[in-house]
Image (tube, grey):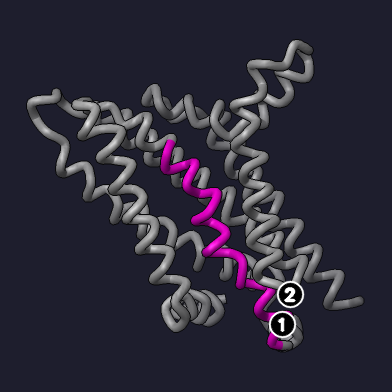
Amino acid sequence: MGAIYRRELCAYFISPIGYVFVGVFLMLSGAFFALSTLFSATTSLSAYFTYVLLSFVVLIPLLTMRQFSEERKTKTEQLLLTSPVSLWGMVAAKFFAAFTLFGVTLLLSCINFLFIRPEHGTVNVPVMFAELFGVLLCGAAFCALGLFLSSLTENQLIAAITSIGAIVAMLGLGFVTPDISNTVLRSTLKWFSIFDRFYTFSYGLFDFTSLFYYTSIAFVFLFLTVRVLEKRRWG
């Protein structure tokens, strides 16, 4: 598992993908921070983190689109499937490689917070850390989703497009649920809404149900990825 993790992490910087991801992430986060915080003369970071979540529509597929699709295209997947590493170990290694790059880049983007102007007030540090933690959990869930979709095809473009569509759908629930008149349907969709779960962290609360929600999504998609590979191994 360790060898696959290191290989996947290095692969991001052998190709341009890793550099593009880090560069675009930092550029967008800087622009979002300037627009939502500096130019607005506020110390609230809620709008900033909301914009960051929306940027995952493009950023996360960059990380995950190649992970399994490239293995299928280059015919190296069979080498992985017949290696002594368990399927869970293989999937976990690829997931943690993507999540590591994502997490490190997210932490690097926190340099933006050093430019908050004291005359605009003081930052609510517990809320800031709670929101940052929520973004990290959301990124983990989307990385697992993208990994699963990458395992379904050998075409990286298809993997990216389906990931974008799935993330848009999951984020979009937060915008459409208030307009639904059916109470049962609205409550059900609200429970699955990424944004509704994230708003808990925007109050500075480390809510267990939100933590369970994001980790459950990540686990379910990692489990589905293992099943896809298991079927291909014996198929």
- Kindly identify which residue carries mark 2: 154
180 vs 32: above or below: above
Q: Report the residue at 28% width, 40% height from top.
A: 33
Image quadrant where residue 174 sits? top right
- Earlier residue among tags 2 and 1: 1
Q: Main secondary structure of the magenta part?
A: helix
Identified by mark 2, the residue type is: Glu
- Answer with left or right where residue 6 lies relative to residue 111: right
Residue 185 in the image, given as x and y percentages of width and height: 78, 19
231 part of magenta stretch: no
Q: Are circles 2 and 1 on residues that touch, CB within 8 Å?
A: yes
- Answer with left or right where residue 75 lies relative to residue 105: right
- Kindly identify which residue carries mark 1: 73
Quadrant containing the C terminus in the rendered view: bottom right
Residue 4 in the image, given as x and y percentages of width and height: 56, 79
The range drawn in magenta is 51-74
Identified by mark 1, the residue type is: Lys
